[in-house]
Image (cartoon, helix red, strand yellow):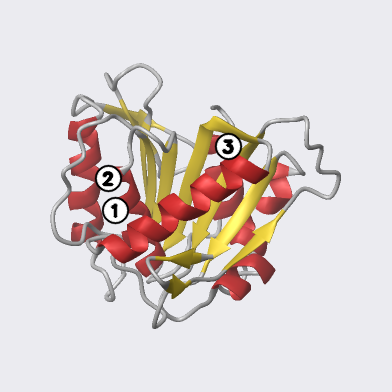
Amino acid sequence: IVVSGTTRQYVLTLPANYNPQHPYRLIFAFHGASYTAQSVADGGPPGSGPYYGIASPANGSAIFVAPQALSSSWNPQTAADLDFVRAMLASFEANLCVDESRVFSVGFSRGAIMTIGIGCAEGSVFRAIAAMSGEIQGTCAGAHPIAYWASHGMSDTTIPIASGQMARDEFVSINHCGSQTIAGSPDGCVNYQGCDDGYPTTWCPFDGIHQPPPFAGTAIWSFLSQF
């Protein structure tokens, strides 16, 4: 797709039995700096599975897209990357049967930074985001609630967990959650209480380094599939 004179690329995966009369969830999956759109579509970081392991439990109920960054990195503070997202979304909504009320973003590392940037800038368009090992780049001017799921390795030295906690706290505030949490699933995750109705906020620290958690696919799908 050409965006502001620049050719951008993505990998699009339709359900095996795609029905052009059936509205599907649309899930964007953003790669990290060490990966590519194709690697995310094919299997992602080691042990993840296609689209961070979400494709399997989704079982044909969603359209997936893995966008390719310029120079292997994402920057949600630039118009170029956000305009790329908006152009893809406009194209998919015009040419595919997309449920426009169920558009999601998922990402790891730099892809999580991009996903968080989308949550800040496009909360009125995206229904929920899931960020693995991410942080806020620049500032977050988001004001529209957006369902938020995030994981972070407690031994992450690439993006320290404190940075992930700061991003989490931003969305706790955006979603008007209280400070109280209750245990979530899988073990170690917590769900914030008092959030705006329909905008749950989940935080999943885990014993690991800079990596998607081993439970990423099933946990993220369980979160997204409630919408």
Q: Amino acid at mark 1?
A: Gly
Which of labels 3 and 2 is toward the front? 2
> What is the secondary structure assignment of the residue under circle 1?
helix
Estimate how packed mark 1 is, as few (under 14), some (14 to 19) or many (20 or more) residues with alpha carbons within 10 Å. Answer: many
Residue 181, x across and y down, in percent: 29, 29
> What is the secondary structure assignment of the residue under circle 3?
helix
Q: Amino acid at mark 2?
A: Ala
State if disc 2 and disc 3 touch (CB < 8 Å): no
Q: Quadrant of the C terminus?
A: top right
The tag earlier along the polypeptide, 3 or 2, is 2
| Distance from Cα at disc 1 to Cα at disc 3 | 22 Å
Q: Which mark is residue 121?
A: 2
Which of labels 1 and 3 is toward the front? 1
> What is the secondary structure assignment of the residue under circle 2?
helix
Q: Is residue 161 above or below residue 19?
A: below
Disc 3 designates what residue? 222
In front of the other: 120 or 59: 120
The tag earlier along the polypeptide, 1 or 3, is 1
Which of labels 2 and 1 is toward the front? 2
